[in-house]
Amino acid sequence: MKKLIRLLLFAFLFSIFFLLVRSQLANSTRRGAPPYQAEDLNPPENLYDWMADWQRPDGPPKVGLQVGHWKNDELPDELSRLKGNTGSNGGGKTEWEVNLAIAQEAAKLLHEQGVVVEILPSTIPTRFWADVFVAIHADGSTTPIASGFKAATPRRDFSGKADKLLTFIEDNYQAATNLGKDSNISRNMRGYYAFAWWRYEHAVHPMTASLILEAGFLTNARDRKLLVYNPEVPARGIVNGIMDYLMFQGLLNSS
């Protein structure tokens, strides 16, 4: 009897150990934002002056929704190193298909609120400006237990507004999707190529409040069910966050 108890205890401890190892493996093997380069993190100091007198263009609120990995084979030469980076997959879907479905649902909701929306592929128009830019991605891992969403702002935010946008997006996205918040923010996210306007012609204007969102894990059954079969749910979370931000900035018609 004692031998059986010892065996059961050993099996229990081994199971706990195995789950911990898999969790660590999930953190180290996640596939998300395209890999950054060190030069994408810190702009040269002598490029700041031209922004001093910048003013927002007249017009209704404008939002850019980038579909991560969409039309990746059309990236310009300056971003050729990212070609072939197709992102994650799951449920018979590639990442860009899932990202596109979410972006399209979000665009419909924003249009209904009188917001101008552009859905963008991997290639950002030259010095693209908007009140809000959200790069939509979906995570992946070699282990199915990895779950949750995460969002990040540029490492250097010249708009001074990205942190507020991040707060609104995180709060509303979590409320809409019921997904846990993944705290594993990588340098690939903070150094996302679309943020590096000093390095690339095809990048977001520095006065655009920007963030990148990993909407959930395509390799997790629960996350995948939401992302693949109910894209309107994550879309609603994104839109609610954007609308709260636009309201906070006084960019919505109160009438």
Image: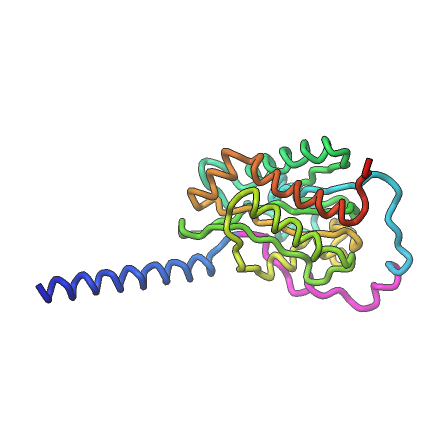
Q: Quadrant of the N terminus?
A: bottom left
Q: Is residue 36 left or right of residue 217?
A: right
What's the residue at 65%, 65% (across, down)?
38
Quadrant of the image occupied by residue 125: top right
What percent of the width, then of the height, locates residue 74? 66, 41
Furthest-bottom residue in this view: 45
Image quarter of the C terminus: top right
Using the rendered image of the protein, determine whether residue 191 is visible from the camera's viewpoint: yes
Task: Please say whether residue 36 is one of the residues in the magenta stretch.
Answer: yes
* Residue located at (64% from left, 61% from top): 37
Q: Read off the magenta span.
A: 32-50
- Residue 46 in percent (x, y) is at 84, 67
Residue 168 located left or right of residue 13: right
Residue lying at 66% horizontally and 45% vertically, measured from the top left: 241
Work out which residue is located at the far front of the displayed protein and give it. 255
Q: Foreground residue, 135 or 74?
A: 135
